[in-house]
Image (tube, rainbow, N blue to C red):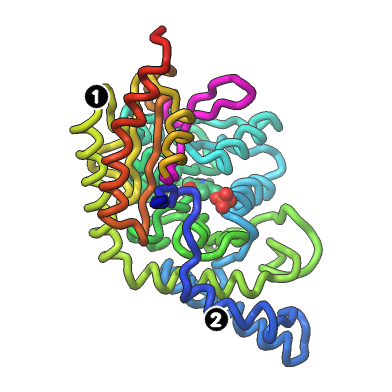
Amino acid sequence: MRKVYLDYAATTPVRPEVVEAMRPYWSEKFGNASSIHSFGREARIAIEQSREKIASFLNAETEEIIFTGSITESDNLAILGLTGRFPEKMGQLITSEIEHHAVLDTFITLEKRGYQVSYLSVNQEGIVNLKALEKSLKKKTLLVSVMYANNEVGTIEPIEEIGEMISALNAKEKSWRVHFHTDAATVFEYLPLDVKKLKVDLLSLGPHKFGGPKGIGILYVKKDIDLSPLTFGGHQEFGLCPGTEAVPLIVGAAKAFELAAKEKEENKKRVSGLRDRLISGVLENISDVFLTGDAGKRLPGIASFSFRDVEGEAVLLRLDKEGIAASSGSACTSGELKSSHVLLAMGIPQEEAHGSIRFSLGRETTREDIDYVLEKLPKVIEDIRKMTPKL
Ligand SMILES: *Cc1c(COP(=O)(O)O)cnc(C)c1O
């Protein structure tokens, strides 16, 4: 059976060049980078060269790059590490309603601990309300965290404008500093990512979303920012992420950055062409379906839809039988239907959010893959609609 993987936003296959780059670091170059003998020095050099390389792709300084265990950990370290420096719960915190749970749940936890958190609303396309942000910033704010692009519907957020707004405020009000964090997990393969241009203080991402290994995350921390660690032990990663470094994963991450940076323009063009083919094919051939997210300001790899009168998970299971891997914003856990917080925040009614399906395309997606989906999907939706009792 044909296999079509359209879940690149969940994770991507590790590229052969990345596997090759990592290979010696599992066995013959296995040293602990903290050891002073030649085995250790070899590992240390590999880590620092990787750090330097990744920094250059983000237009950051080498010492501003921290290796963590996942993107989730990077998000947590950014938010909890910063608030941890201000023990008196000083200043309000601002985030958006459509963040990944790695960010959202961290703020919810802080709120339970007594912090004041504002959650910015979004419009129907999933774009964060800048007017609300401007208004909210009038109160003393410690941290703003807004994602670069949404992983469920692909909407690209006005990050540069937010960075501009915050830095203008900081230039005016010298006695107080607003910090800016963005979760940029989904964008490196396609969009410009220059920490200075974006005027961010903290930025998280990870290589498994673009051909690199899992088990490693990256956090950019602007050099004048002092975070408080969440874990304690050794001196590794400037004391922010203590524990023996995952040398193979770090080397693999640097390779994934290098390849993705080199192919950015070409990838963006090719993948968005396939995405548009999928979007127009679905909208033309299936009734009662609409595109979720913004039509223009959209990640090249994301085609997300809401199908009326079907349940997302039922569609996923049927697609899986046809060899097609996609994902749904809704989850049917323990018999209870739970809709995506992102779609609900966009004002999509519960019953329509239930039928949401996300196809996320990537580097190895072909035109044949898309045509196969367009051949199978209409029948899958039709069959499920026939079986679903109308309410
Ligand atoms: C994938 C993703 C994460 C979490 O990544 P993990 O590898 O599971 O830690 C966080 N934010 C966004 C936007 C993502 O796409």
Q: Position of residue 250 (x, y in %)?
A: 59, 71
Q: Earlier in the sequence, mark 2 or mark 1?
A: 2
Q: Is residue 326 magenta?
A: yes
Residue marked by disc 2: 49
Q: Is residue 271 magenta?
A: no
Query: Local crowd at mark 1 within 10 Å, few (<14), some, or many (≥20)?
Result: few
Q: Is residue 351 above or below residue 231?
A: above
Tell me if I can see residue 42 in this picture: yes
The residue range painted magenta reads 323-343
Question: Mark 1 is on which residue type?
Answer: Ser
Residue marked by disc 1: 287
Numbered disc 1: secondary structure: loop
Q: Position of residue 151 (x, y in %)?
A: 43, 44
Question: Mark 2 is on which residue type?
Answer: Gln
Residue drawn at 62 percent across, 85 percent down: 45
Q: Residue furthest bottom?
A: 38
Residue drawn at 43 percent across, 52 percent down: 8
Tell me if I can see residue 169 in this picture: no
Between circles 2 and 1, the one closer to the viewer is 1
Q: Position of residue 375 (x, y in %)?
A: 27, 40
Q: CA distance from mark 2 to mark 1?
A: 53 Å
- Judge by depth and name the residue closer to the eye, 212 or 47: 212
Residue drawn at 59 percent across, 79 percent down: 23
Q: Is residue 134 above or below residue 164?
A: above
Q: Residue furthest top?
A: 391
Q: Are marks 2 and 1 in contact (CB under 8 Å)?
A: no
- Judge by depth and name the residue closer to the eye, 212 or 162: 212
Q: Residue furthest front?
A: 1
Queried on whether the Cβ of the residue with tag 1 lies below 8 angstroms from ligand 1, the answer reads no
Numbered disc 2: secondary structure: helix
Q: Position of residue 88 (x, y in %)?
A: 70, 39
